[in-house]
Image: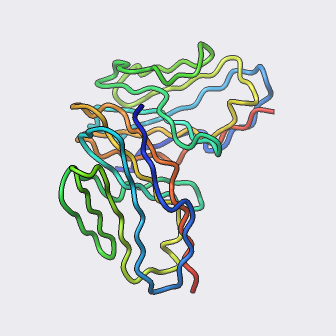
Amino acid sequence: KNEVEQSPQNLTAQEGEFITINCSYSVGISALHWLQQHPGGGIVSLFMLSSGKKKHGRLIATINIQEKHSSLHITASHPRDSAVYICAVNYGGSQGNLIFGKGTKLSVKP
Amino acid sequence: DAGVIQSPRHEVTEMGQEVTLRCKPISGHDYLFWYRQTMMRGLELLIYFNNNVPIDDSGMPEDRFSAKMPNASFSTLKIQPSEPRDSAVYFCASSLEAEAFFGQGTRLTVV
């Protein structure tokens, strides 16, 4: 069974803290995505990666293919980072479809 | 480009009625996906198209659900007849090179 597991489910942090959200998957993938869903419901793609590391502003995503694990880091967290962060993977060689984790609800307190 | 456009944003309907959700993908994107999000199950793929052709509809819950993509700029997801358990947020997404762009979603409530 193809599964995507995220941890933690819920995370509360103080403004300025360094945050890490983890994602593990069960079989080989072609790509892994990190998505952000704001309280209003809209979903935004943050990263798509198949190896190594990507950085965008205060966000960093890493993936370890051998360990089937990815992390999303947020440096100098801010209350506007409060959202649900969702890990999703593409299995197989084509774009196919995305299998989603349950999401991590992040709340950053001022 | 205005992004992926879904309509309506909210829909409230009575059980047994037909519901049609609409999606306009980003111009030039060749993949279109329909997803459903519920509290219990999170996000799930319902069906996806490549170049207007349905590729995988194994996520469509039952025959009450149908989806069409008559051209590259328009897709519909229809539920007939609707049931209370269909209440969810339905997202449409499009992509060109694997990175998906999502619409704002349609929040469906079936009473």
Q: In this view, does A101 lie to the left or right of B109?
A: left
Residue A19 against residue B40 in the figure, above or below: below
Q: Which of the colour schemes (rainbow, by chain, secondary structure, one colour) is used?
A: rainbow
Residue at position x 25%, y 69% in the image: A55
Residue B84 against residue A85 in the figure, above or below: above
Q: Quadrant of residue A12?
A: bottom right
Q: Which residue lies furthest to the left in this view?
A: A52
Residue at position x 47%, y 59% in the image: A7
Q: Which residue lies furthest to the top in this view?
A: B63
Q: In this view, does B71 lie to the left or right of A41?
A: left
| Residue B102, position as x, y percentages in the image | 43, 46
Looking at the rendered image, the quarter that the C terminus of chain B falls into is: top right
| Residue A21, position as x, y percentages in the image | 42, 64
Q: Which is more toward the observer, B54 or B46?
A: B46
Q: How many marks?
A: 0
Residue A36 against residue B86 in the figure, above or below: below
Q: Quadrant of residue B80?
A: top right
| Residue B70, position as x, y percentages in the image | 41, 19
